[in-house]
Amino acid sequence: MLFRSRSVEMAGPGLINWYFSLYDTNLLQLWTLPVGIPPEHQISGIKVDGPKAFLLFSATGKERNNDPGFEVAAIDITSGKMLLSSGKAGSGGTVSGFEVSEPYAWLGINTREGHGRIYQFDLVSGSIKPFLHNISGNPFLVGFTGHKNDGTLTALFSKRLSKKQIGRAHV
């Protein structure tokens, strides 16, 4: 079960508690884990793989313009242990994809400026790094798929061309 605290139960400066709980078949609570998440963040993606759940939190709606931050929670459902990774995506944007293939998770974001970006999370260490591409201009991220165990991915980007560029391409 997953729920957000409705009261003003702050987990720290600028954070509100979300609770993750596991119940057995007799509805007896096995564990509860409170996690501090910024109040403007909502769940933007969920992936479940066997005994593990992966949740992406990010700002949605108008809030995403002011808050480029995001969190990825990797929860071992059996033990109730969690690794929380946090990062920022430049000047905000829209989540365009969330994939998990242990030991990695990827977050795709299209910024307000039209830049498609992919961030890779190491689910063991909690480190985050941008996945770099060599496409010039402002490529828009259409989608991507992560590949198991090797930390690589296949991504599709789209790029708008001006009429002048299209004319040159057809000459």
Image: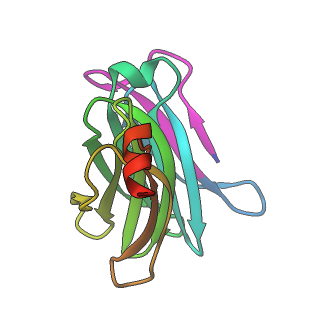
Q: 162 left or right of 122? A: right
Vertical placement of 159 versus 42: above or below?
Answer: below
Q: 50 left or right of 114? A: right
Q: Quadrant of residue 147?
A: bottom left
Vertical placement of 12 versus 77: above or below?
Answer: above
Q: Nearer the viewer, residue 40 or 106?
A: 106
Q: Residue most toward the front? A: 171
Magenta highlight on residue 120: no
- The secondary structure making up most of the magenta span is strand
Residue at (69%, 55%) from the top-left corner? 28
On the image, the x and y values in percent for residue 136 come to 25, 52
On the image, the x and y values in percent for residue 88 come to 26, 39
Q: 108 left or right of 67? A: right
Can residue 39 be seen here?
no
Residue at (33%, 77%) from the top-left corner? 151
Q: Which residues are magenta?
A: 2-21
